[in-house]
Image (cartoon, helix red, strand yellow):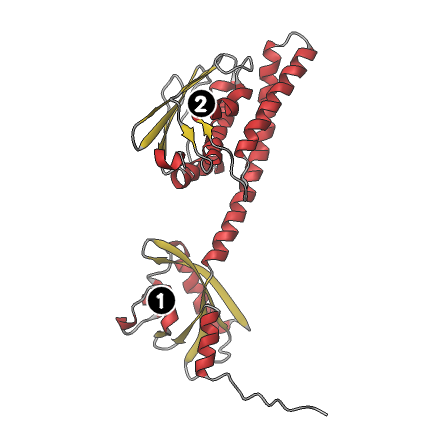
Amino acid sequence: MSRKSTTPQVWDTKRLRIATDAAGIALWSWNVDSDEIELDEKAHLMWGVPVENGLITFEGLSARIHPQDLDRVRAAFTATRDILGGYEIDFRIMYGSEVRWISARGRGEDQGIVGRVMFGVFLDVSERKMAEEAREMLANEMSHRVKNLFAIASALTDIASRSAATTQEMAADLRSRLTALGRAHELVRPLLSEQKKAAHLGELLGILLDAYDEKGVIGDRIRIVVPDLLVGEASVTALALVVHELATNSVKYGALSNAVGTLEISSTADDSTIVVVWTEKGGPPVQKARGEPGFGSKLVNRSITSQLGGSIDFDWPTAGMIVTLRMSKARLGA
C-alpha cells in the first residue's frame, strides 16, 4: 500500500530561486524571431551587463564574447534549434580586462519552447576551466622536460668524454654530472604542497649549472658573477625553471653544445628591480628564432612575467646569444 507524502509542494518561484542561487545558476530566455535576450539578475552580474541597459539582443551580448570564440559560439547557438536533446556550449567572455569561462546550457530541437521563446541557463565555469588548463599545462611541461632530459643526457656524455682518459674516468664523470643534474631537477620540479628553501642567487645558479661545466667545477667554462641576493622560497622553482630551460637550449644549440663555448651570468640590482644577464660566446653560429615560440619559450615567459613580475629579452649578436632577465626584487625575494 503506497503512502502519500504529507510534505506540501515547496518548489514555488521563491524556493526555486534560492536553489538556483545556491548552485550558481543564471537564467536566460531567447526570442528566436526578435533575437531579444532576457537575463535574470545573476546573468546580468555574470556578464557584467547593467540591468538598466534595456533591450539586450544576442548580437549585442556577443560583443562581450572573446574574439577567438565568437564565430564558434554564433554557429553553435544558431544550430541549437536543430540539436536533439540537451546541449552545452563553453566559451570565454571579456569581463573588463578579465577573462571568464561561461557554459550555456539548454534543450535543442525546440524542446520546451514557449511561443517563440527558448530557455536555458548560464554557469560560470572559470575555476573548472582554469584547473583544466593548469593540468594540461603541467602535462605538457612534464612531456617537454622528459624530451629535454634525453638531449641533456646525450650532451653530458659528450662533455664527460672530452676530458676522460679511460672509460672508468668517463663513467665517474658522467655519474657526477647526472647527480648534479638531479639536484638541479629537484629545484625545477613543481611541488603542490611544499615550498623550496630560500637560497642565495649565486648558490642557486651554481647548483643549476654545475652539471654543464667542462670540468664539473663552476668557473671553467661557466662564470657566475652576481651580488649576494636571496631568492625567496616562493620564487626558487620559477627562477630555477627559467635557468634550467636556458641551460638546456644552450647544451642543445648554443655555447655549451661544443668544447669551446662559454657562458657568463652577471647581475645588477636596484631598490625595485634585479637584472640578470646571460651571455653566451663561442658556440655555433647564432640564428634568431623564427616562427611561433615553442612550449619551452612560453614556459619561460610565463614564469618570468606571471610569477616573477618581470620580462625577458633576447639578443642575437654574432658572438653569441644574450638573454636579459628583469625581475621584481620584491617578487624574487618573497
Q: Circle 2: is it few (<14), some (14-19), or many (20+) Cα within 10 Å?
A: some
Residue 104 image point, x, y percent? 46, 67
Q: CA distance from mark 2 to mark 1?
A: 50 Å
Mark 2 falls on what kind of element? helix
Badge number at residue 202: 2
Q: Is residue 205 visible?
A: yes
Residue 123 image point, x, y percent? 46, 66
In the picture, the quarter occupied by the C terminus is: top left
Looking at the image, which residue is at 47% across and 52% down?
Answer: 130
**Looking at the picture, which amino acid does disc 2 mark?**
Gly
Looking at the image, which residue is at 52% across and 13% down?
Answer: 259
Mark 2 or mark 1: name the one nearer the start of the chain.
Answer: 1
Quadrant in the picture for residue 324: top left
**Is 328 above or below relative to 126?**
above
Residue 95 image point, x, y percent? 34, 58
Q: Nearer the viewer, residue 121 or 21?
A: 21
Badge number at residue 109: none
**Is 311 above or below relative to 119?**
above
Q: Nearer the viewer, residue 79 or 167?
A: 167
The residue under label 1 is: 45
Whether residue 215 sits left or right of residue 48 in the image: it is right
Q: Circle 1: is it few (<14), some (14-19), or many (20+) Cα within 10 Å?
A: few
Residue 13 image point, x, y percent? 44, 82
Looking at the image, which residue is at 69% across and 91% down?
Answer: 2
**Which residue ends up furthest to the right in the rendered image?**
1
Whether residue 29 sits left or right of residue 211 in the image: it is left
Q: Nearer the viewer, residue 193 or 24?
A: 193
Mark 1 falls on what kind of element? helix
Q: Is residue 292 visible?
A: no
**Is 135 above or below relative to 275?**
below
Foreground label between 2 and 1: 2
In the picture, the quarter occupied by the N terminus is: bottom right
